[in-house]
Image (cartoon, rainbow, N blue to C red):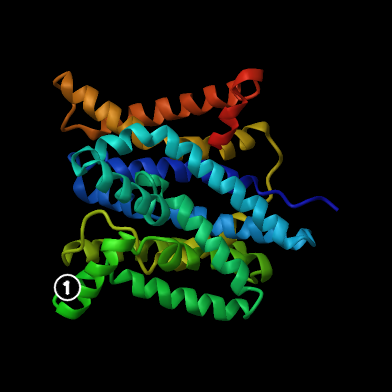
């Protein structure tokens, strides 16, 4: 019996990493705002995709191994080392961003961010994933997957009002007060409790229950879901939501349908798929540093400040080149530490 492969997921991981870069630059905003926001809305699926596939692949490992606790420990250890490695690499930028806070306050803010909101920008994904995996793992020992999905969906909906749907509660002084106190400690509802928990749960569900949806139907439903995601994003934008927000209702079915399609696609093995899988992690980790560097340098040179498309192209090219260099060098005797970057 041939072992199931996930090469389609590996390819999508690489594409999703590029989606993340797109979201953080909006390269076409000054050319065609509606087109840019459409692509921006589609790109939002990247992070839910990462969470769902992580939940799915983790669940698949658990199913194959009797030592579930050991699988969990090994997985969380790997994610934490990855998080720590990128946090160290991004530390100079974190210090720069907190330089006006004073030493003690700056350290306290950094520690809060490290635990709850990510040590730097995009790195929020890792503590969220750790908490999401922990919640799903331990809940799955106590209650059914359907109940886990129900609980995590309710939490996600609550989190919506602290993020993209904040406009609906912004006139309620009591809720605004509660949210302000919450933000002071936890910084955001885009975290493992209100965000990652649901998408990791969907990954668990996909691992435990095989879908009866045909591929053609799945593709059609995915297309409809993406269109509705775009409509929702524009509705939120036009009704006063911040341009950059993280949570949408339609990310739930879109994420489910996308991963369900990919796990049922079998394609022949090629060495480049492993590169896609590993480089996607490196691109995700390094891209924000490159965005800042290129934006600063190009503006200092007196051009392209108003042309983020140039920053986008440079960031994509250099991020890919950086990942190639890391993957080539990591097997060298004295620099195996580079393996901690993916």
Q: Residue furthest front?
A: 104
Instruction: State whether residue 98 is above or below residue 326.
Output: below
Q: Considering the image in quadrants, where does the C terminus appear?
A: top right
Instruction: State whether residue 96 is above or below residue 255.
Output: above
Q: Residue at x 51, y 61 (%)?
A: 131
* Total residue callouts: 1
Q: Is residue 169 visible?
A: no
- Looking at the picture, how far across and down is residue 29, in whole percent? 21, 43
Instruction: Give whichever of 252, 197 is nearer the camera.
Output: 197
Q: Residue at x 61, y 76 (%)?
A: 145
* Other-residue count near label 1 (Cα within 10 Å), few / some / many at <14 / 14–19 / ≥20: some
Q: Quadrant of residue 308?
A: top left
Q: Residue furthest right?
A: 1
Q: Quadrant of residue 102?
A: top left
Q: Secondary structure at mark 1?
A: loop
Q: Is residue 98 visible?
A: yes
Q: Residue at x 72, y 56 (%)?
A: 70
- Looking at the picture, how far across and down is residue 81, in whole percent? 55, 42
Question: Mark 1 — residue?
Answer: 170
């Amino acid at each position: 019996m041939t072992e199931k492969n996930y090469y389609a997921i590996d390819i999508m991981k690489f594409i999703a990493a590029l989606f993340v870069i797109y979201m953080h630059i909006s390269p076409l905003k000054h050319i065609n705002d509606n087109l840019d926001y459409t692509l921006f809305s589609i790109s939002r699926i990247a992070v839910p995709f990462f969470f769902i596939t992580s939940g799915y692949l983790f669940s698949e490992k658990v199913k194959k191994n009797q030592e579930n606790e050991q699988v969990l420990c090994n997985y969380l250890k790997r994610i934490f080392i990855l998080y720590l490695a990128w946090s160290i690499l991004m530390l100079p930028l974190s210090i720069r961003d907190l330089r006006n806070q004073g030493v003690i306050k700056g350290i306290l803010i950094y520690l809060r961010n490290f635990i709850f909101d990510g040590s730097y920008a995009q790195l929020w994904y890792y503590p969220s994933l750790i908490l999401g995996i922990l919640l799903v793992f331990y809940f799955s020992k106590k209650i059914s997957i359907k109940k886990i999905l129900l609980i995590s969906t309710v939490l996600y909906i609550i989190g919506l009002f602290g993020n993209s749907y904040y406009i609906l509660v912004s006139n309620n002084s009591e809720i605004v007060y509660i949210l302000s106190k919450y933000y002071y400690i936890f910084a955001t509802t885009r975290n493992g409790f209100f965000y990652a928990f649901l998408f990791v749960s969907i990954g668990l569900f996909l691992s435990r229950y095989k879908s009866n949806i045909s591929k053609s139907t799945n593709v059609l439903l995915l297309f409809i879901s993406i269109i509705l995601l775009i409509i929702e994003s524009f509705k939120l934008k036009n009704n006063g939501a911040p341009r950059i927000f993280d949570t949408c209702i339609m990310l739930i079915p879109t994420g489910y349908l996308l991963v369900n399609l990919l796990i049922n696609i079998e394609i022949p093995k090629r060495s480049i798929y492993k590169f896609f899988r590993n480089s996607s992690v490196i691109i995700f980790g390094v891209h924000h540093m490159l965005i800042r560097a290129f934006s600063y340098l190009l503006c200092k040179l007196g051009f392209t400040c108003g042309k983020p498309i140039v920053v986008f192209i440079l960031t994509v090219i250099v991020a890919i080149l950086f990942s190639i260099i890391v993957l080539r060098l990591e097997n060298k005797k004295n620099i195996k530490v580079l393996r901690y970057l993916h």
